[in-house]
Image (cartoon, coloured by chain):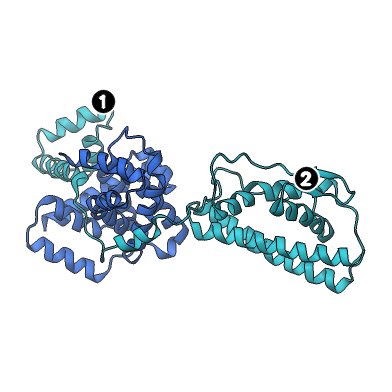
Chain colours: A cyan, B blue
Amino acid sequence: MSDRFTAQLSAYIDGELDDLSLARLESHLAECLDCTRTVAELRAIVAAAPDYRGREPSRDLWNDIERRLDEPEVVPINPSRPPMQPSRHRFGWRELIAASIVMAAVGGGAVWVALDGTVREVPTAAAPAPITAEQQNVEFADREYDAAIQDLELLLARGQNRLDSATIRTIEQSLSKIDEAITEARAAVQRDPANAYLSRQIAANMRRKLNLLRVATQAIAART
Amino acid sequence: MTQADLDRDDVQLASAGDHDAFERLYRRHVARVTSLARWLLDAGEADDAVQEVFIRVWQKLHTFAGQSAFGTWLHRVAVNLLLRRRQSLGSSRRRQVNDEVQMLAAAGASERPDLRVAIERAVDLLPAGAREVFVLHDMEGYKHDEIAEMLAVDPGTSRSQLHRARLLLRQQLAT
């Protein structure tokens, strides 16, 4: 038995040797009983391996599975979508507050009023079939949320200087924590796109952010 | 009727929402999926992962076009999900061979079970890298290029791990 040839036996069995190596190995096999026996034993393993029978789980899982069959499916964030890149423009809290007006409109209907009073239609995705609330949340997280923020970059300059500095600081800190949680969850989803829990976490944090922005918007409105 | 025929009928029924048909599919395939989960994940993760696999299969059943056997398709879904799950668990939770499994394998060897059963037990004892490649290549039929992509290794590493696994199995089965 030769180490040099032994190393080639799997490639030989799988038909991956080039002509020269194949000729040399077959010549060796013609006179090496050990290698010939090894080839036969490896072939037997390779032949039997796909027919493994498997082993039952440690307990019957069917009841647990059946209970979850008709739960609404959470659509994972599209793994092929490139990770969000930080915008060149850093949004301030005032811009985000203004964004909340749009997002509140997205959540509540198809029309919103911009700060300049212009009535605009919020684009809505064509939905051929009813989708669940969770699907809406995740789809919203993936498309509408980012689009709404970016659309408002052009609109947000008004309504400033209406809150005191302590309130501003509180809002900024809260937004920062929520953004951090969203970023972490997005990164985790990139690694594990099928993980429904992570998708729910993103949707939940989106809702938190939206609620916070709504509260901030109401505070500005109260001081106008 | 062959298993493939039974599967085809039950897939059709299950796609229309028939839980009983899906349970039959589950019962026919759960053992192999469970073994896959044990080989590719920590044994403690297997049951939970198997549940996830079958729920995922139920959700994706309408996408099964029937061009391959249901079992083949199921295993593709399972392998993808198990590897993603393993990736999300991180390297610190990679499967370790435990004493119980070693004892089981030793007991099995002394009973001289048939080769298929002996291989299954011996696979438990393989080092993680060799085991994963052996399971994916020889048991599940993936090519080295596919395995390299799935495990984020070089195709040459996949080949050498496969050869190592086969030699270790041969050694294990000879004892």
**x and y, in percent, of residue B42 in the image:** 34, 63
Depth check: give the residue in front, A110 or B79: A110
- Residue B153 vs B126, above or below: the answer is above
Q: Residue furthest bottom?
A: A166
Nearer-N-terminus badge (2/1)? 1
On the image, numbered disc 1 is attached to which residue? A19
**Who's the residue at 59% across and 51% down the image?**
A136
Left or right, B7 with respect to B171, comes to right
Which residue is tagged 2?
A151
Q: Nearer the viewer, mark 2 or mark 1?
A: 2
**Residue A11 located left or right of residue A133:** left
Q: Tell me the kind of residue under disc 2.
A: Asp
**Chain that bears disc 1:** A
Direction from residue B14 to residue A32 in the image, left or right: left
Q: Residues within 10 Å of mark 2 (few under 14, many from 20)?
A: few
Quadrant housing the C terminus of chain B: bottom left
Q: In which quadrant of the rendered image does the N terminus of chain B lie?
A: top left
Relative to the observer, which residue lies in front, A103 or A24?
Answer: A103
Q: Are marks 2 and 1 on the same chain?
A: yes
Query: In front here: B156 or B93?
Result: B93
Q: Quadrant of residue B87?
A: bottom left
State the SS at label 2. helix
- Which residue occupies 19% across, 49% down? A52
